């Protein structure tokens, strides 16, 4: 190979594979192929769920129809909306997730700030006990908590979610305390000392200096807390006193309605069409209606994520939380 051909070979290699500090076309193509493949694996169930939710019964039974329906219908959403009583259930879900999430974020911020900025007696023991509450599985404390709520006549009310959050014992409160404690430790103590010299009170130092500097921690803790409260079905059903799928006296959330969708749909069909229970099988709701109900359930979280995506990613980056 002469010098001219060798130079052309090096240029082609540099453009296709790249060199130090600059990636080539083939390298970037490989990276994008991997990212698209990974994205497809995650998005496939969601895309299939959304497509099927708009299918008619004919398309659903037609094996040749997979991704593109022959006709788009909204009747599945209409039926799912009526069965799940979305107008009432959404409000119950927002209250049962939003109020505890706000309370938990505020209390964990105060606790984390106190542990990070002040020297209190038995501080290491307190931090160790907080870690212990994170290590212990919530199912271990399920029976004592239920007994305590029952003794105070709180079963079946939102107090079972709000009061523990106000006392720093909400869903995974320990991890939020540790996040705030680590975040406030990064704030220079000289800012507090300068504020005290200027006559600022401890209350003003917290709200005037610490809180504005910890906005990413507040956002990420609130978002994760809201999502975890929204997605919880087991403990919500237990503490709300839900004993059967047909129990309408307790507070029902979107996830609980989705969990009992088949039974609720049977009752809806009996009421609307007058079918007897004997002519219906175990499940009368077709897959398209179930998919529509699922899309309705996750839509508020998806909307919240798209609106707050920037803060969500920034908060994860700065706090190191991964959502396990």
Image: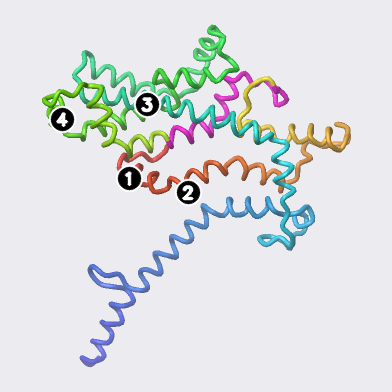
Binning the other alpha carbons within 10 Å of mark 4 as few (below 14), some (14 to 19) or many (20 upward) gives few
Q: Position of residue 49 (x, y in %)?
A: 63, 50
Crowdedness near tag 2: few (<14), some (14–19) or many (≥20) residues, C-alpha within 10 Å = few
Q: Which percent across, then down, holds residue 34?
A: 43, 62
Q: Secondary structure at mark 4?
A: helix
Q: Nearer the viewer, mark 1 or mark 2?
A: 2
Residue 218 percent across, percent down from the top left: 35, 34
- The residue indicated by pointer 4 is 189
Q: Quadrant of residue 133?
A: top left
- Residue 317 got which mark? 1
Quadrant of the image for the C terminus?
top left
Kindly identify the residue that appears in the image at 65 percent across and 31 percent down. Answer: 88
Tag 2 near tag 4, CB within 8 Å: no
Which residue does the numbered mark 3 point to in the structure image? Answer: 106
User: Are dots 1 and 3 in contact, CB under 8 Å?
Assistant: no
> How many numbered discs?
4
Q: Point out the stretch of residues depicted in magenta.
A: 223-248
Report which quarter residue 247 is drawn in: top right
Q: Residue at x 39, y 26 (%)?
A: 173
Residue on which the image places disc 2: 306
Q: Is residue 68 above or below residue 209?
A: below
The quadrant where residue 7 appears: bottom left
Disc 3 from disc 2: Cα separation: 24 Å
Q: CA distance from mark 2 to mark 4?
A: 36 Å
Residue visible at 18% across and 24% down? 200
């Amino acid at each position: 190979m002469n010098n001219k051909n060798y130079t052309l070979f090096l240029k082609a290699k540099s453009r296709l594979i790249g060199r130090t500090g600059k990636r080539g076309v083939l390298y970037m193509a490989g990276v994008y192929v991997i990212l698209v493949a990974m994205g497809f694996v995650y998005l496939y169930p969601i895309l299939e769920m959304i497509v099927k939710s708009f299918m008619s019964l004919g398309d659903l039974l037609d094996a040749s129809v997979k991704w593109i329906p022959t006709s788009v219908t909204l009747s599945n959403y209409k039926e799912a909306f009526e069965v799940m009583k979305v107008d009432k259930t959404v409000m119950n879900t927002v209250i049962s997730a939003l109020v505890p999430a706000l309370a938990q974020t505020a209390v964990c911020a105060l606790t984390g700030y106190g542990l990070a900025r002040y020297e209190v007696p038995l501080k290491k023991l307190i931090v160790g006990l907080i870690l212990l509450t994170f290590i212990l599985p919530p199912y271990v404390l399920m029976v004592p908590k239920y007994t305590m709520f029952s003794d105070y006549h709180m079963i079946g009310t939102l107090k079972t979610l709000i009061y523990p959050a106000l006392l720093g014992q909400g869903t995974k409160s320990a991890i939020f305390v540790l996040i705030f404690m680590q975040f406030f430790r990064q704030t220079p103590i000289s800012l507090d000392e300068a504020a005290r010299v200027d006559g600022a009170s401890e209350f003003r130092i917290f709200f005037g200096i610490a809180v504005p500097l910890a906005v990413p921690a507040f956002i990420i803790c609130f978002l994760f807390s809201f999502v975890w409260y929204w997605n919880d079905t087991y403990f919500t059903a237990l503490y709300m006193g839900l004993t059967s799928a047909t129990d309408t006296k307790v507070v029902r959330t979107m996830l609980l309605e989705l969990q009992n969708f088949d039974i609720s749909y049977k009752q809806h069909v009996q009421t609307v069409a007058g079918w007897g229970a004997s002519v219906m099988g175990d499940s009368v709701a077709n897959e398209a209606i179930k998919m529509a109900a699922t899309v309705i359930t996750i839509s508020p979280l998806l909307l919240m994520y798209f609106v707050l995506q920037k803060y969500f990613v920034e908060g994860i980056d700065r706090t190191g939380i991964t959502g396990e």
